Image (spheres, rainbow, N blue to C red):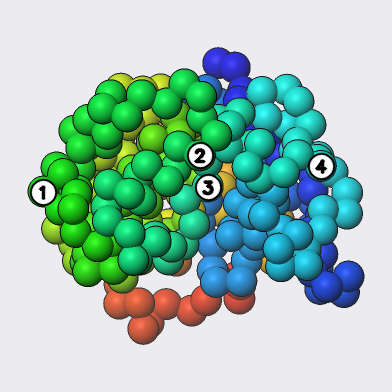
Amino acid sequence: MSTVLEVNNIQVVYQHTVQALRGLSLSIPKGSIVTMLGANGSGKTTTLKAISGLLHLENGDITSGNIQFFGKDTRGTPPHKLVRKGLFHVMEGRRVFEELSVESNLIAATYADKEYKKNERLEEVYSYFPRLEERRRQSAGYLSGGEQQMLAIGRALIAKPKVMLLDEPSLGLAPILVNEIFEAIKRINAENGVSILLVEQNAALAFSVANYGYIIEHGRVALDGTIDKLSQNTDVQEFYLGIEKHGKSRSFKDVKHYRRRKRWLS
């Protein structure tokens, strides 16, 4: 299987002093869904911003290593040009244009796309998210959090991505809407062949759609493998899936933080 995106041993520093990533590497095979798991502050969002070229907006720099998109180094490529090449970052927090209607938000994603076909693209988005069609004339600021997340993913679809970066798509959403969104993510991957790099706090949810996973700790990869392999790892079961030995469920309050036991790093 060919690789569409490769992150090779990158180090990232903010404000010239704070090191966020320490030699992190990962790869995204064509047509796959790959997930990144890790505690808050472990470097997951920084990895996505490094890939999409948004680091400089927060005074961040890649100090070593490289990122290749379809075999070409992305260093120095502005974010909007990466979007045109097929790399779209759906950021945490939705970030829709609240004053614009749902449909205007979608049309805004077509900026500088000479091949844009309005009806065809909108119909595709609405086929994945019928709620958006029902609310297409409504201001985005009046949508629920789940509907705004649908809109954010819909804007990515308008741009015809080859690779989509999703940062915490389930954050703060009602379970019924989370299920709708993740069903759509699976369909987008299966029907359009879009490769997806997914950052998600809900490990069970991420594992339900992903093919491969990386566990990030202190800005580097602590463990990686197929979802089947990770699901069998006792530390992953305990710290991410809430399962004790013998398959018993465990309360989150009773689980010590995984940084206290690093057997997977030995």
Q: Earlier in the sequence, mark 4 or mark 3?
A: 4
- Marks 3 and 1, how far apart in space? 25 Å
Q: Could you tell me which secondary element the residue under label 4 belongs to?
A: loop
Task: Give the side of residue 140 with respect to residue 138, left or right.
Answer: right
The amino acid type of the residue labelled 2 equals Tyr
Q: Position of residue 166 (x, y in %)?
A: 46, 49
Q: Residue at x 55, y 16 (%)?
A: 1
Q: What is the crowding at mark 1: few (fewer than 14 residues within 10 Å), some, or many (at least 20)? A: few
Q: Earlier in the sequence, mark 2 or mark 3?
A: 3
Nearest to the observer: residue 202 or residue 92: 92
Q: Residue furthest top?
A: 1
Name the residue carrying label 3. 89
Q: CB of mark 4 within 8 Å of CB of mark 1?
A: no
Q: Position of residue 28 (x, y in %)?
A: 57, 32
Location of residue 217 (image quadrant): bottom right
Question: Closer to us: mark 4 or mark 1?
Answer: 1
Name the residue carrying label 2. 111
Name the residue carrying label 1. 134
Question: Closer to us: mark 2 or mark 4?
Answer: 2
Q: Could you tell me which secondary element the residue under label 1 belongs to?
A: helix
